[in-house]
Amino acid sequence: MLQSVPVLTLCFLAGFVGCSLRIAIVGGGISGTSTAYFLNEILGARVDVTLFEGSKIGGRLSTISVEGCEYETGGAVIHEKNKYATDLAVKMGLTKMRDDSSSSEVLGLYANNEIIFVSSKFSWFNNIKFLWRYGFDVVRLQQFTDNMLKSFDNVYDVQDKNNSYECLDGLMSAIDPVFLKYMDVSTFDGFKEDGFSSEIINELIQGTLKVNYGQTTSVHRFVGSVSIAGAGATLFSLEGGNKLLPQKLLAASKAKLINSFVKEIGQRGKEFTVKTEFNGTSSESQFDYVIISTPLTVDPARKNKIQFTGHLADIAVPGNYWTTVCTIVKGDINPHFFGYKSAQDVPDLVISVTDSFFNSISTINPVKSGQSCGTVWKVFSRKRLTDVEINTLFQSVKFVQHIDWLAYPHYDVKQHSYNFTLSDGLYYTNALEWAASAIEMDIIGARNVALLLKKKIENYGNISVDEARFSTSSIAHDEV
Ligand SMILES: Cc1cc2nc3c(=O)[nH]c(=O)nc-3n(C[C@H](O)[C@H](O)[C@H](O)COP(=O)(O)OP(=O)(O)OC[C@H]3O[C@@H](n4cnc5c(N)ncnc54)[C@H](O)[C@@H]3O)c2cc1C
């Protein structure tokens, strides 16, 4: 071993062809593609990355075509303070499109079969309307959100210092220890303890949760707070569709793309075996490290589940994902359902804050600016809308399509048992979704895993690649 060190160290550090560590990424959504991008950025030629995606690159960033225009059906908006998504979009040459729903569009809150609150197009009047209904709590909520966003910014410093964490709690605590506490209390209880009125919690806060996560204020306060952060903020989407970001990241990462679903992951010796299937053809390949970038919960509705075999068989990710159905409708809204005489009066976004067959309904714009294909609506609901429900919401319908999403975790409180490291050499970027599911969070989870891998590999910095490949435990640099 001593004899081999100098040559192999040189090989390892320089990343000569043939010296690279083989890394598999499973999943080509924003998590998997940003992981590939960061691995290339951080480790360059020292790694040889293969990304497996059985469906389309983008995953939950996806669009649908309606009579010549495309519309977002999954992750649609990005907060202006989301540094990674913003910076990566710029680096990938993508253009931001402002989301007008965050400013001038009219919001209606719907409860128990009627509209109970309508905002205004005009910001000065809007402020008065919100203050009138919710009092000073509106200002306090804004202050809370500003402070939270400021604390959240710590994550960028933490990661710029190359710090990485094996588990969700470690990362959350490094960003701000209070965020861990927020995960232990429901959104309702947390805001109530801080003296917010039941009215603002049950209406405004619940409204943001219904539209963003399909859930109620029983979810933990961290995800509740992330949900509120989008309200009234400047939001954007990417010209041409948000799915362009994962597509471009993958291209920039230089990772090899294999268009197959991974069926099985096992380990023979220290090497991972990844079995895939595409169009009935199976194949198998070997890797030094594997990164899972797709949710691993065993929801009955989840297709393409990965089976772990051998000593990995006991890997289990608890919890379930929440089903949200996105229904895209081109048609004429029924104003009478909302208590209006004219369609012009129906707010641009209506959120049902109590139990209803729909969570939200809003007009949406095509992903390309300047395009116009008539009024298209997006309805979010827990279950598929029936024909009767569609005909209740709309007077006439020209186009309807349902997209069933296993959309985001089914949140509760005290959901801490999520790890970025599933086993030695096997990583899981989506652990962070249990704090809050969002494009930026996925990119943060991806960078955390890339940094974990960097730490792992660099701890092997002065041993051979083969030793790095076949060593099970992390060896500190100064211990070798
Ligand atoms: C309706 C909806 C609205 C949303 N709105 C917003 C929003 O406005 N803003 C925001 O920031 N976030 C939003 N989100 C959340 C955001 O879209 C997700 O957090 C993000 O897109 C998840 O990315 P991911 O890469 O982690 O997972 P996915 O996008 O789910 O990617 C996983 C990929 O893995 C692939 N895969 C699965 N199993 C296998 C296998 N066995 N082998 C190979 N490949 C496999 C899948 O095909 C998929 O492409 C929304 C989500 C939904 C569903």
Image (cartoon, rainbow, N blue to C red):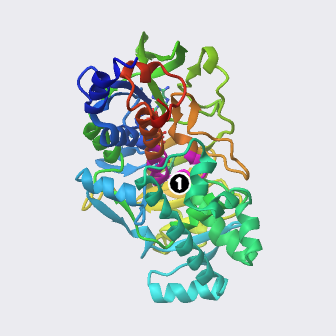
Q: Position of residue 308 (x, y in %)?
A: 59, 20
Q: In which image quadrant can residue 78 be found? A: bottom left
* Quadrant occupied by the N terminus: top left
Label 1: which secondary element: strand
The residue under label 1 is 379
Q: Residues within 10 Å of mark 1 (few under 14, many from 20)?
A: many
* Magenta residues (range): 432-446
Query: Foreground residue, 14 or 267?
Result: 14
Visible residue check, residue 349: yes
Please, what is the three-letter code of the amino acid marked with disc 1? Val
> Residue at the location (38% across, 32% down)?
461
> Where is 110 relative to 9, above or below?
below
Query: Foreground residue, 439 or 18?
Result: 18
> Where is 15 relative to 319, above or below?
above
Q: Position of residue 237 (x, y in %)?
A: 36, 58
Residue 71 included in the magenta stretch of the image: no
